[in-house]
Image (cartoon, rainbow, N blue to C red):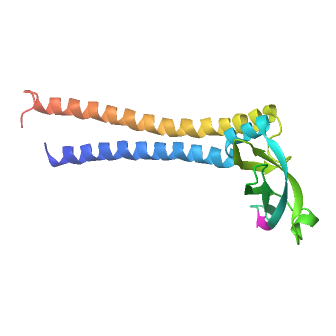
Amino acid sequence: MNRRTTNNAENIHYSLIKGIVIGVLLMLGAFWFWWHLAGNPFEEFALIRSAQTVSGFIIDTWEEPGETDYGETRWSHSVTYKYCVPSGREFMGNSKGRGRLSQELSDLTEPYPVEIEYLPNKPKVSRIKGGGCQSITEWLWRKIGIGGILLVVFLSIGFSIIQNAINEFKRSKMLSGNMTEENNSPMCTE
């Protein structure tokens, strides 16, 4: 095998590996994006179906301005809350959102009372009552519908890149196999 054939084979393998790696990374990125965008859809579904409610307190808040591409200010905020379940165990949670906090929360000087929804079998999973999806229909639309469409789009792009890399690898293997046979045929003499 000559040097030209060796370099061509290395390029074919490099192209295959590069296509597979890019495709897999895009697919993993799609799952991460969906999970980040939608949160844990299974925990949210469980909260809709079987949440228990207890009293809790918002103990810390922050809000921060950000700037959009159009020069507009877009606010984001976060609140930290704590609550006790009937067994006496205390938990803390965090809730993030967009927009400004209410005046009473932005100037928080003492704990602010709120209702907290939590899962009895997994009390660390919680949210402030009224946050997140409130019905199975809303959950299906927001978490599965919109998130699922975005997930399918990104997964299909990643799958397509992998498929194209494999097809290109097969095509180049067939061409290099035909060229080798032609070079070894008795009609080709140099």
Residue 121 vs 70, above or below: the answer is above
Image-based side of 40 in relation to 7, left or right? right
Q: Is residue 121 left or right of residue 167?
A: right
Residue shown at 54%/39% (left/top)?
157
The quarter of the picture where residue 96 lies is: bottom right
Relative image position of residue 166 (x, y in whole percent): 38, 35
For this rendering, which residue is in front, 164 or 136? 136
Residue span colored magenta: 63-67
Could you tell me which residue is drawn at 20 percent across and 43 percent down?
Answer: 5
What residue is at 25 percent from the left and 43 percent from the top? 9
Work out whether 143 lies above or below 3.
Answer: above
Q: Residue sitting at 56 percent across and 38 percent down?
A: 155
Position in image of residue 95 (x %, y %): 77, 56
From the viewer's perspective, tell me whether residue 161 is left or right of residue 66. left
User: What secondary structure characterizes most of the magenta part?
Assistant: strand
Q: Position of residue 169 (x, y in %)?
A: 34, 36
Q: Decide if residue 39 is in sight here.
A: yes
| Magenta-drawn stretch contains 9 | no
Residue 187 in the image: x percent, y percent?
9, 27
